[in-house]
Image: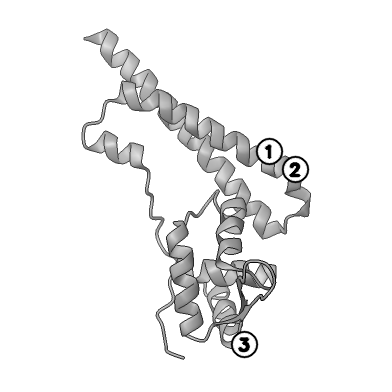
């Protein structure tokens, strides 16, 4: 066991395995896509790397399932559970790290008339999927889970509104020229 600096993706993995009881890295990846995607994305390769780091640090234990595909099933150790609980109780504020590729393209001179229609459509699609999720399982979620999903819904609404504004602004600018 080694001491390892825990990052937000580390806590994401610990939190998902804690909720599931035990899980393979593949299960963690799927659960992250299904549940926390509205407000936190994590690359699939990072999930596998985090599982290995947390296992090496003694925060996860593993059991090999002999039947089927010989999967590696992970569970929190007492140290892992304590680390997760300590993090959950920490009120530290960390500024939002926005990573919107379309916004970055705008900044560097991307064409608003090309970017905006696609961005509006994609954010509307994502918004619909989050709203469907809320309709389908909203009453099964804890209050914290429902509030986090609501953040995703509100974020996507804001992005639809923003890109609609960009498109309308571009339309006005091009007719003024």
Residue on which disc 2 sits: 136
Horizontal and vertical percent position of residue 121: 49, 27
Mark seen at residue 132: 1
Q: Which quadrant does the C terminus fall into?
A: top left
User: Could you tell whether 26 is left or right of 135 in the image?
Assistant: left
Establish if 159 lies above or below 111: below
Q: How many marks?
A: 3
Mark 3 or mark 1, which has the lower sequence index? Answer: 3
Q: CA distance from mark 3 to mark 1?
A: 37 Å
Establish if 85 lies above or below 79: above
> Do labels 2 and 3 touch, CB within 8 Å?
no
Horizontal and vertical percent position of residue 124: 54, 31
Q: CA distance from mark 2 to mark 3?
A: 34 Å
Task: Indicate the quadrant where residue 82 lies.
Answer: bottom right
Name the residue rendered at 46%, 28% in the picture: 120
Q: CA distance from mark 1 to mark 2?
A: 6 Å
Secondary structure beneath disc 1? helix
Mark seen at residue 1: none
Residue on which disc 3 sits: 78
Horizontal and vertical percent position of residue 31: 61, 58
> Do labels 1 and 2 touch, CB within 8 Å?
yes
Q: Residues within 10 Å of mark 2 (few under 14, many from 20)?
A: few
User: Could you tell whether 69 is left or right of 112 in the image?
Assistant: right
Q: Residue furthest bottom?
A: 1
Residue 146 seen in the current view: yes
Secondary structure beneath disc 3? helix
Residue 92 seen in the current view: no
Establish if 5 lies above or below 115: below
Name the residue rendered at 56%, 52% in the picture: 33
Q: Residues within 10 Å of mark 1 (few under 14, many from 20)?
A: few
Task: Indicate the quadrant where residue 117 lies.
Answer: top left
């Amino acid at each position: 066991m080694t001491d390892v600096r825990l990052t937000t993706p580390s806590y994401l993995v610990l939190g998902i395995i804690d909720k599931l009881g035990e899980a393979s890295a593949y299960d963690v990846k799927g659960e992250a896509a299904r549940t926390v995607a509205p407000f936190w994305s994590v690359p699939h390769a990072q999930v596998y790397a985090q599982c290995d780091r947390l296992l090496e640090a003694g925060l996860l234990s593993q059991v090999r399932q002999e039947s089927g595909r010989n999967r590696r099933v992970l569970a929190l150790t007492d140290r892992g559970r304590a680390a997760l609980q300590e993090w959950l109780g920490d009120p530290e504020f960390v500024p939002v790290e926005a990573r919107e590729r379309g916004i970055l393209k705008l900044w560097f001179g991307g064409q608003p008339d090309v970017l905006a229609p696609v961005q509006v459509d994609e954010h509307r699609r994502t918004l619909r999927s989050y709203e469907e999720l809320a309709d389908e399982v909203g009453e099964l979620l804890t209050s914290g889970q429902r509030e986090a999903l609501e953040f995703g819904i509100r974020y996507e609404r804001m992005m639809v509104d923003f890109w609609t504004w960009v498109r309308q602004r571009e339309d006005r600018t091009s007719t003024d020229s």
